[in-house]
Structure formats: structure tokens, C-alpha cells
Image (cartoon, helix red, strand yellow):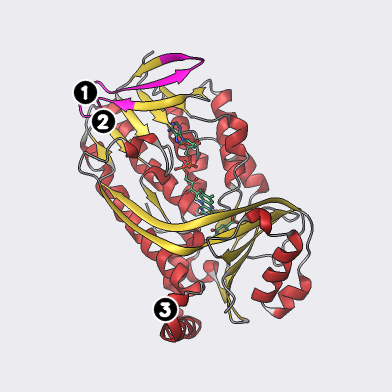
Amino acid sequence: MRTQVVIVGSGPSGLLLGQLLTNAGIDNIIIDRVDRDYILGRIRAGVLEVGMVGMMDKAKAGERMHKEGLIHEGFSLSFDGVQHRIDLQGLTGTSVMVYGQTEVTRDLMDKRIETGGLTIYNAGNVTPHDFDTDHPYVTYEKDGVTHRIDADFIAGCDGFHGTCRASVQDKGVKNFEKVYPFGWLGVLADVPPVDHELIYAHHERGFALCSQRSLVRSRYYVQVPLTDKAEEWSDDAFWDELRRRIPADKAEALKTGPSIEKSIAPLRSFVAEPLRFGRMFLAGDAGHIVPPTGAKGLNLAASDIHYLFSGLQEFYGEKRMAALNDYSRRALSRIWKAERFSWSMTMLMHTFEAEGEFGVRMQQSEFAYLTGSKAAQLSMAENYVGLPY
Ligand code: FAD
Ligand code: DHB
């Protein structure tokens, strides 16, 4: 088989790239190691920056998002019970949209079917080859047979544990990493959200986040030790712990119900440099991970795809490699800023035993500075809504 761009991974970054290419008349094939239902069963991000919303529109997959997504003009930080609202709209003139990653993925998958894009699911042992030549190809196994797809380019959109970054470990890639000593226990429940906006809460027992998917579906998180197991947390224990960590009036108003999903995600900061290896490009979680505190993971995948797609469009339209040659530099410049923001929000809002009393005083004074300084609030707001592409 031959195509122009072979995309490894059918998550948000692979699907977005695939749709933009298809709309531009550039042939592409997506390969994933699991199937559609498995991918749609993962509960992940929920907050879209204005840039990501624009990318969904550009992919012509934004119709349902505009109907069902919720515009949020602010969010709150709660610090040991004191709540402070960050007025995103007033500070930056823009807002964010609450629309789950599952729905983003479903809309992109449906658009791909509608426009006739080929996706190969349940592909085993996917392997990129010869990407340091002009004739790269990918092999995979399906139904006991090894298949080969020749292409002009390979897009490695296969997440943190994918095969594309793994295949460049001996090709001069440099990895930067920080692992945090805790995880987030997340619960999804069909109950109305406790507030119309998100609340990020710092508490001496640990961080908590009140988020949502719709007016009748809530997503909540609490910081837990990495040794905890999701199945050992009963729903009641989760709701009790959440109530302890959020402002008292919210704890009282909290509506609880049976969980429809419960899982623990570890927190990590990670960047691979560079993101281009000859004719293979890494995008999204394949190239970097942020801790979820700043709601940046999914949004960074979209900005990578913006840079990668413009490079591929230039190549096929004008036969020039300039933008592709510059992909890694442009993408990394925005990635590192989002890494910094996600790290700083994580350090402010969680409890870190190892940082001791000094660390607690630093967090308290940062929160006091933030609540008293318009400049500090603007800095947080402009990062939260997303830096320009
Ligand atoms: P992915 O969504 O990981 O997609 C990669 C795809 O590649 C997958 O479909 C996978 O099956 C496929 N793949 C993997 N290996 C191979 C292979 N060898 N061969 C073929 N295909 C392969 N971000 C937030 O902003 N907020 C959150 O609350 C949040 N929660 C998260 C919770 C978890 C458990 C995880 C893992 C991430 C979370 N994120 C969150 C981050 C966000 O979901 C990601 O940044 C986003 O999914 C990145 O999209 P992607 O397409 O680059 O990668
Ligand atoms: C959600 C996750 C986040 O990491 C975040 O910062 C905000 C919202 C969510 O899953 O809804």
C-alpha cells in the first residue's frame, strides 16, 4: 500500500492531522494498535483553548462542539478554603470551552468516516522504517499477516508509550523529565456540577478539582499517593475526601451519585527534543507530557498539529521544505511555555511532603500575590486560555 502521509495513532492529534490533510486533498492512512471503542472509552481532558476550538472548525468537525460545548469565562482557585475567581474574559478578552476529549475524538472519527478516510485499527507491532531516507515506510501485523505502507512522511501521533519515539532513542533524541510523587484519582458521575465554573483547590490533605462535561455530568479529581488503587476507593470515600478539600459552601452543595468511571493518572512533565527525525515527526503526547493541572495536554497536541499541517501543506502545495524543517523549533517553543505553566500550577496547587514548611509558605505567598496582583492574574489567565500559535 502507498499513501502520502502515514499517521501512527488515532488519538486527537492523529485524527486532527488526518482530517486537515483529507480536507486539503492530501492522502493519508491512520493506524492504531487498538479499536475505536477502546479509544472512546478513555476519559481524559475536558478544557479546550480557543486555538483547539479553531482547529476543530478548520477540520470541519466543530459543529456538535459549538452546540454542546460550554463556554467558560473564568475559573476559581481555592486555597485552604479561600476562593478567588480568575476572570478569563475580563483579563484576556477570551474564554475556554468545556467539551470532553471523548467527544472531540468521536466527532473527528465520525468526520473521517464521512469523508472516506482510511483507519486501520487493531494493528499489531506497528514499526516505522527508513525515516532518515526519502522513502520511509511503516509495517504492521494484522490477522497473522505483515503489511507495509510506503509514504512520503510518517507522523508519530501515538502517545507517550508509542512506537515512534521509542524508535529514535538511539538517534540523538534528548529526553527531559520530571515525575511527581502523586497521581490524580478521577471520577465521572451523572450529577450536576457543583459550580458553573471549574474550581482548582489547594488543601493540606491534597489538591482537588471540580470539573464537568455538561450541565448534568461532572468530573472530579483528588490528589492521591501513587500507591493507591482506584478500585480500593469506594464512591463514598471519594465524595467524602472531595468535600473535605473544597470550600465549605461548595462541599455542602455537592451532588453525589454512582461513579461511571474511576481511574488514577500519574503526573509527569516530559519533553523530547527534537521532534523531527528525517521524514518522521512526533506530535502530541508522543513528544511531550504535561501534568494535567493547567489543562494543556490535549491543547498542545492541537498546536503541534497546526505547525505540522502547515509544513505538510507547504510541501505538497509549493514543493518547499522550509516549514517542515522548522517544525521542531516552532512546536517546542510553545511546548516549553506550556510545560512551564503546567509545572508552576502543579507546584502551587498540590501538597508536597518533601518541600516542608518552607514550601508551604512559598505556596501561601504565591496565592496571596496572585489574589492581590492584576498582573499575576493576567499572567495566569493568558496561559490558561492558551498562548498564540
Ligand atoms: P493519545 O490520546 O495518547 O493517542 C495516541 C494513540 O496512539 C492512541 O489511540 C493509542 O492507542 C495509539 N498508539 C499507541 N501506541 C501505538 C502503537 N505502538 N502503534 C499504533 N498506535 C499506537 N490532558 C488534559 O488536558 N486534562 C486531563 O485531565 C487529562 N487527563 C489525562 C488522563 C490520562 C490517563 C492520560 C494518559 C492523559 C490525560 N491528559 C489530560 C492528556 C491528554 O489526554 C493527552 O495530551 C491527549 O490525549 C494527547 O493526544 P494524542 O493524540 O497525542 O495521544
Ligand atoms: C479537566 C482536567 C484537567 O486537567 C483540567 O485542568 C481541567 C479539567 C477535566 O478532565 O475536566
Mark 1 packing: few (<14 Cα in 10 Å), some, or many (20+)? few
Q: Which of 67/235 is in front?
A: 235
Q: Position of residue 38 (x, y in %)?
A: 60, 35
Tell me which label, 1 or 3, sits earlier in the chain: 1
Label 3: state its secondary structure: helix
The residue type indicated by label 1 comes to Asp
Residue 129 belongs to the span the image colors magenta: yes
Residue that numbered label 3 is attached to: 355
**Image quadrant assignment for residue 321:** top left
Whether residues under marks 1 and 3 lie with C-beta atoms below 8 angstroms apart, the answer is no
Magenta segment? 128-146
Whether residues under marks 1 and 2 lie with C-beta atoms below 8 angstroms apart, the answer is yes
**Image quadrant assignment for residue 158:** top left
Q: Identify the residue at image location x=40%, y=29%.
A: 7
Q: Quadrant of the N terminus?
A: top left
Label 3 to label 2, Cα distance in Å?
44 Å
Residue that numbered label 2 is attached to: 279
Q: Which of 300/273 is in front?
A: 273
**Image quadrant assignment for residue 317:** top left
Residue that numbered label 1 is attached to: 134
Label 1 to label 3, Cα distance in Å?
50 Å
Mark 3 packing: few (<14 Cα in 10 Å), some, or many (20+)? few
Q: Identify the residue at image location x=51%, y=82%.
A: 371
Mark 1 beta carbon near ligand 1 (under 8 Å): no
Query: How many numbered circles does the render carry?
Result: 3
Q: Which of 53/308 is in front?
A: 308
